[in-house]
Amino acid sequence: MALKIETFDNKTGGQCYFKALGHPMSAGLARDLARQLTDATDIAIYDPLGQIEPFDALYSLDEATVSGVYVQNIEHLGREVMGKTTRPITDLPSSKADIVFIPAFDATRLVDQIAHLIPAGASVVTLDEIRLDPGFLTNKRHYLDPLNFATNFAFFREGAGHHTRVVTANYWGGYGAKGTFMWLCLFDGDGNQIAEWQEELGPANSSVVIDSKEVASRLNLPEFCGQLFIHVINGAGHDVVKYALDTYGDNADTLSCTHDANAWPSDLYAGLPAPEDGEKVVLWIQNSHPEAIPAGAIGLNRMGQDKVEWLDKPVPGFGSYALDVRDLLPGLEWPEQIEIRAGKHFVRPRYEITKKNNRLRISHPNVERVDLKPDPKLADIANLMGKGFVLPAPVLPGGGYRSELLPTPMSTAQKNLPITALVYNSDGQEIARHRFGCLSRDHSELLDLGALAGGALGEIPGHCELIYDFLDGGEADGWLHGLFRYTDLKTGHAAETSFGAHMFNHVLTYKGEPHSYAGPAPGLSTRLFLRTAPEPIDAFCHLIYPVSSQWHQTSQTKLMLHNANGDLVAERDVKIPASGSHYFTLRTTFTEDECKEAGPYCYVLIRDVTCRLFGYHGLIRQGESFSLDHMFGF
């Protein structure tokens, strides 16, 4: 059963009540509070904000003696909450409770409103007793301001020749934030806190790098494999902690990357690939809450099938568990795909694939929506929106790489997938297309994009666009996703990424599309972050200019090289044709002198005020290894 917590609403955004309850700094105090309530002779719960069930989900009150649950809103009377039928707060004086518990922060006003109703001799307990120290609050006047809980988790490992690196920028400073810092808390695989420290962030838009190798050396830590809790304090503009996570090794053949974890736990995730013959696929279950995930709460099933196999082991609070998917689903083989029953116990997880040659790669599934239903208008607005929703992804040169596409159902409403794949060269010319028809939810149809292109791309990468195609019927809800896998044919090294569709570069809008990260739709500008790494590793970027219907013939794109302090060192202008793409590396775009001036952990800001580009980035060690995932912007 999923935890009774609200994490994310697609209209109002992320919730932070559960973050406030489960923050590592507050967890011990919250356990003490729950113990106090359990030890009480009788408690009355006053729940004007409907927040007792999330508290109970994280800190069970099953053993507490609850005589009544009271509410303020008459429309909330008669509900079953905590095994009790809710009553009006005006009935509270007849209670014999020795504690009145109000599960709310900033509760002074709520307490004052019912002061005359408190039973004689009863004490009042609120969540203000577990608040963070004021020095850790960005907005001290409103505790549940999302900026107070700009938090996220990152997979973090150091040992056996494997390392991890979290890279982002102080983009909060670009929105005017001052005195911004990170509070970092490191948990080992058993959920034990083994380190905590603060990182003062540099000037606005300066680089932020947290390297497991450096952290372990500086803090004298033993080997670990767990998760890093990141809390940004004194931020502005964004309550989302975005980052790129690089995994690298002592050997040159170990290199991979993945996107940020998405800070809100979900009921379901999808797009987890079954292993190929000889591969091992591990799903990293990393508990995002302070209390243990019980045995039988996490499950896997083949996509499109109802039979779920449940993990019969608990996972400690903030702990990690490496689940070999063959332990639960031994009969599945790539390109079959797996659905994850997560129950809101963890944020978007990582999975790690070990190939026969021991090369590793890491990626992430995506949130499977449970709030969607088919949208018949998507088939009717093609005359207005052209291709409508577009999912773009690179197609690497067929002589050196194999590029594969697996469409992935990503909402419970998707019983079928009516789709077509288009391949474009870098000049924006369509060179091939493949009609999947109307795929079933349980399909395992894999498309070799290089073979589809038939050599027409040559040595210059192109791109694929996955779009809806209703010629054979079917339904759509706009949440179109795919998994893209890339394999170096010489070394066998691989990387993969998955993402969803948007409408791109069209002045008409539909249900918040073309999507904008800042302001209302349409989103018609670009601000992407390309991180780099120390030599001999180079950074690369594949920019795609997808167009749903009709927009400017070329982009007006600037590639802006910044040093680690955020200072501009050099820039280049690029014009990308509509429906075309542009592939570049740091060291072939900027001169050796410019790269030296920019120094280690420089970055490239990709800026375009005329159109919305979609980007993929990675690191490459020529002839040995590479990584690839979709980019983020701020």
Image: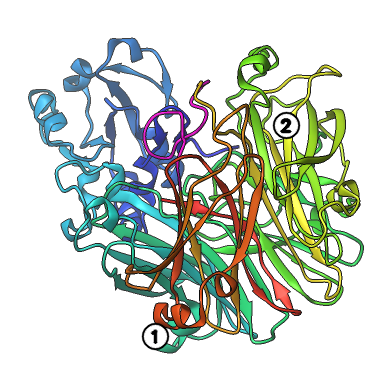
Residue 412 x/y as whole percent: 68, 29
Q: Quadrant of residue 38?
A: top left
Q: Which of 36 and 181 lies nearest the eye of the viewer?
A: 181
Chain-order first, disc 1 or disc 2: 1
Q: What crowding class fits label 2: few (fewer than 14 Cα within 10 Å), some (14-19), or many (20 or more)?
A: many
Q: For marks 1 and 2, give the CA distance.
A: 49 Å
The one of 594 and 179 positioned closer to us in this rendering: 594
**Whole-percent x, y for residue 423 in the image:** 78, 43
Q: Is residue 513 magenta?
A: yes
In the rendered image, residue 486, in percent from the top left (x then y), is placed at 77, 60
Q: Give the x, y percent position of residue 288.
A: 49, 54
Left or right: where 10 falls relative to 268 = left
Q: Secondary structure at mark 1?
A: helix
Say if residue 298 shows up in the picture: yes
How packed mark 1 is, by other alpha carbons closer than 10 Å (few <14, some 14-19, many 20 or more), is few
The mark found on residue 467 in the picture is 2
Q: To which residue does mark 1 refer? A: 219
Span of residues in magenta: 509-526
Residue type for callout 1: Leu
**Vertical relation: 422 (above or below) 327:** above
Q: Residue at x 55, y 71 (%)?
A: 586
Q: Is residue 273 above or below residue 67?
A: below
Q: Callout 2, which amino acid?
A: Ile
Left-right relation of 479 to 26: right
